[in-house]
Amino acid sequence: MITVHHLQNSRSIRILWLLEELGLPYEIVHYDRHEQLFAPPDYRRLHGLGKAPVITDGTRVVAESGAIIEYVIEVHGDGRLRPAVGSDDWVRYLQWMHLIEGSVMLPYILGIYIDMLGDGGAPVKPRAESEIALHFGFMEQELTGRDFVVGDALTGADIQATFLLDAAAERGLLGDYPALARYRAYMVARPAYARALKKGGAYRIADLTAAAMS
């Protein structure tokens, strides 16, 4: 059985949501954030980086939320929550699976650090804001008129994207992006998402420091 090592207020909400959508049995081990909002020391025993999420599946230990989503879908999903391999939708799915953490999250977190610095961050603030606008503008264009990232059904790419939009919404960054706000509202209204929140516990990420975005 899969065990989700669930850190409060973290990307591991993605994995709980994924497992709820798939209807797979799983166990949760809960961890609270440590001093300065980092994961607690015992989380590092699971994986050398000490970052959430981590799952164990038998003798396997899998880290990185995108990798976990792909692993669970491939090993336990029975063809669900991803397009057919080799299809045009699959290509778009792969790109979105890696877009969020590979491109969009960096300027987003950089913006948090700059805000923490106050006047000290002023020299680089315009650059960060322009990168955030570039990436969020791209997503806005891509998701205009769409209920899902790919096709007409939920995939792992939607689960990957929503965590970032949750954080952005709580920080008030979606006001200029109506398509992203509508898309996020559609995602968080899913019953499986609500079940994941109930099982995962407290989930507020916008008011955490960048160090806590683990």
Image (cartoon, helix red, strand yellow):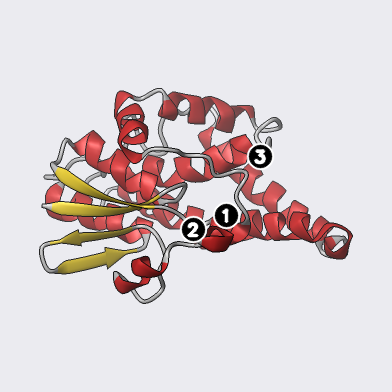
Which numbered mark, 1 or 3, is in the foreground of this view?
3
Residue 1: % across, % down: 10, 52
Residue at screen point 68% across, 38% down: 173
Residue 46: % across, % down: 29, 69
Secondary structure, mark 2, is: helix
Q: Nearer the viewer, residue 106 or 213?
A: 213
Q: CA distance from mark 1 to mark 2?
A: 6 Å
Secondary structure, mark 3, is: loop
Assess whether mark 3 and mark 1 are in contact (beta carbons under 8 angstroms).
Answer: no
Assess whether mark 3 and mark 2 are in contact (beta carbons under 8 angstroms).
Answer: no
Residue annotated with mark 1 = 104
Q: Residue furthest front?
A: 35
Residue annotated with mark 3 = 171
Identify the mark nearer the N-term, 1 or 3: 1
Identify the mark nearer the N-term, 2 or 3: 2
Assess whether mark 2 and mark 1 are in contact (beta carbons under 8 angstroms).
Answer: yes
Identify the amino acid type marked 2: Glu
Residue neighbourhood size for the residue with mark 1, other residues' Cα within 10 Å, grouped as few (<14), some (14–19), many (≥20)? many
Q: Is residue 186 left or right of residue 133?
A: left
- Could you tell me if residue 85 is visible in this image? no
Identify the amino acid type marked 1: Val
Residue 68: % across, % down: 29, 57
Q: Nearer the viewer, residue 10 or 21?
A: 10
Q: Nearer the viewer, residue 153 or 40?
A: 40
Residue at screen point 22% across, 67% down: 61
Residue at screen point 10% across, 63% down: 58
Residue at screen point 53% across, 38% down: 166
Identify the amino acid type marked 3: Arg
Residue neighbourhood size for the residue with mark 2, other residues' Cα within 10 Å, grouped as few (<14), some (14–19), many (≥20)? some
Residue annotated with mark 2 = 101
